Amino acid sequence: MAPSEPRQTKFVLDESHIPRAWYNIVADLPVPPSPPLHPGTGQPIGPDDLAPLFPMALIGQEVSTEREIEIPEPVRDAYRLYRPSPLYRAHRLERALDTPAHIYYKYEGGSPSGSHKPNTAIAQAFFNKEQGVKRLATETGAGQWGSALAFAGAMFGLEVKVYMVRASYDQKPYRRILMETYGAEVVASPSLTTNYGRTVLAVTPDTPGSLGMAISEAVEDAATRDDTKYALGSVLNHVLLHQTVIGQEALEQMSMAGESPDIVIGCTGGGSNFAGLTFPFLGRNFRDGAKHRVIAAEPEAAPSLTRGVYAYDFGDTGKMTPLVKMYTLGSDFIPEPIHAGGLRYHGMSPLVSLLKQHDLIEARSVHQRSSFAAGVTFARAEGILPAPEPTHAIRVAIDEALAAKEAGESRVILFNLCGHGHFDLSAYEQYLAGTLEDYEYPLERVEAALAGLPQV
């Protein structure tokens, strides 16, 4: 269909528009979040309980109720390498779908490591460096977070140890090479370098690993070394906070486009890129009475929001982390080795979970082949190869655009294209060859994992 509106495609802000503060959605939530609990006592934790893992500045952000938290100038200066990121109108995708919907996407793949993850990696590296930390330990699924933290560690002179989920370590060797190029040490998780890793391998030597396992190893590493803190790429409040630069920029760019999104979509594994785009829009819903529909897109192989239960659970498989109230499939659940490794997590951010529990957002699960089909459609129309994770958001965006066509109505759709797929070509190769598998929701395995939920 021939569009009648002006055909501007790219909306770019200059660096003076990099946000000066992160947006904290906790200040605007209609209901307060539940406190994290100590894994031993079951009582609410305090700053001293988190001090072995995080610097005090990040602990303060984790529990803050202030609406805005100032971004330090060294962090904003580092952001200038790639921020503000562009927002695009997907005219060619609209034509391919023959839809009256207007589709926009915020593209985070232009960062040095190729995804949205440096938005928090830079901040975490800065605050650790300020406290005199010498070394960071972390986990990574697909390698996007590990790559970002390795990059940030190089910027601020910190050693970085990355526990990379075994399935992704094997599937994505070039991610490992990128991390090592930045100077990080990378091992497949579970590994022989931690007590927890050795215990797992003794029982299941051929395990594909999971984010829950890798978190346990990284937490053990940090807790047993005085020079080391733990860095997390998703889930926790302070991580989601740092990502809100995405949505704040998108609000300005949508204004430049002269439109406001009816629907805002992000893929969800732990919740960081989803929150980064959607929380500033949700803030408008809560404060100003805006009506943005917000949809979380997750994999059918790890559908915590659509099939999990809302309960207190451990964030890791080794049961070392504080208990947080979230949608969970059970910390013992090991998802199948899908290529969207960043979404292979048993739980969901407590803040995202709270929003879902109170019907303030929607959630949908997407099969692997369906998401890759959407990724290929998008790449052929728009020219950008998406990472496997955001293909889930693309699938939902396409479905909403086709629904608009069926209903004969216009909709403005915005989604977060949180990273490129240049390191994921083996997955696309399998899809194009017809050998990529779908994994059904493993009901019996999830029920078994949920049976082990802590009694809180």
Image: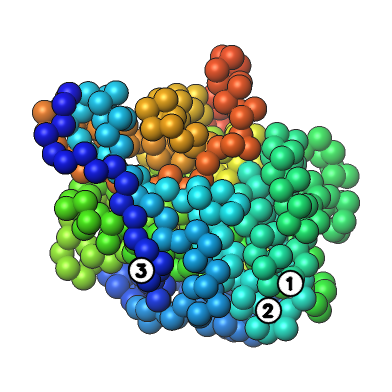
Give the distance between the C-alpha atoms of the residues marked 2 and 3, in whole angstroms: 26 Å
Q: Nearer the viewer, residue 111 or 412?
A: 111
**Disc nearest the viewer among 3 and 1:** 3
- Of the residues under marks 2 and 1, which one precedes in the sequence? 2
| Three-letter residue code for mark 2 | Lys
- Name which quarter of the figure residue 408 lies in: top left
Q: Secondary structure at mark 2?
A: helix
**Neighbourhood count class around disc 2 (C-alpha, 10 Å): few under 14, some 14–19, many 20 upward:** some
Pointer 3 residue: 17
Residue 59 seen in the current view? no
Task: Residue 384 in the image: state x and y as whole percent.
Answer: 46, 35
Task: Residue 312 in the image: state x and y as whole percent.
Answer: 52, 62
- The image quadrant where one finds the N terminus is top left
For image coordinates 47% across by 77% down, the residue present is 71
- Of the residues under marks 3 and 1, which one precedes in the sequence? 3
For image coordinates 18% across by 51% down, the residue present is 259
> Is 189 above or below relative to 250?
above
Label drawn at residue 157:
1
Q: Nearer the viewer, residue 450 or 13?
A: 13
For image coordinates 35% across by 36% down, the residue present is 396
> Is 65 above or below relative to 360?
below
- The image quadrant where one finds the C terminus is bottom right
Task: Residue 27 in the image: state x and y as whole percent.
Answer: 33, 76
- Of the residues under marks 2 and 3, which one precedes in the sequence? 3
| Three-letter residue code for mark 3 | His
Q: Are marks 3 and 1 in contact (CB under 8 Å)?
A: no
For image coordinates 17% across by 53% down, the residue present is 258
Pointer 2 residue: 129
Tell me: 18 left or right of 420: left
User: Which residue lies most toward the top here?
Assistant: 434
Tell me: 306 left or right of 411: right
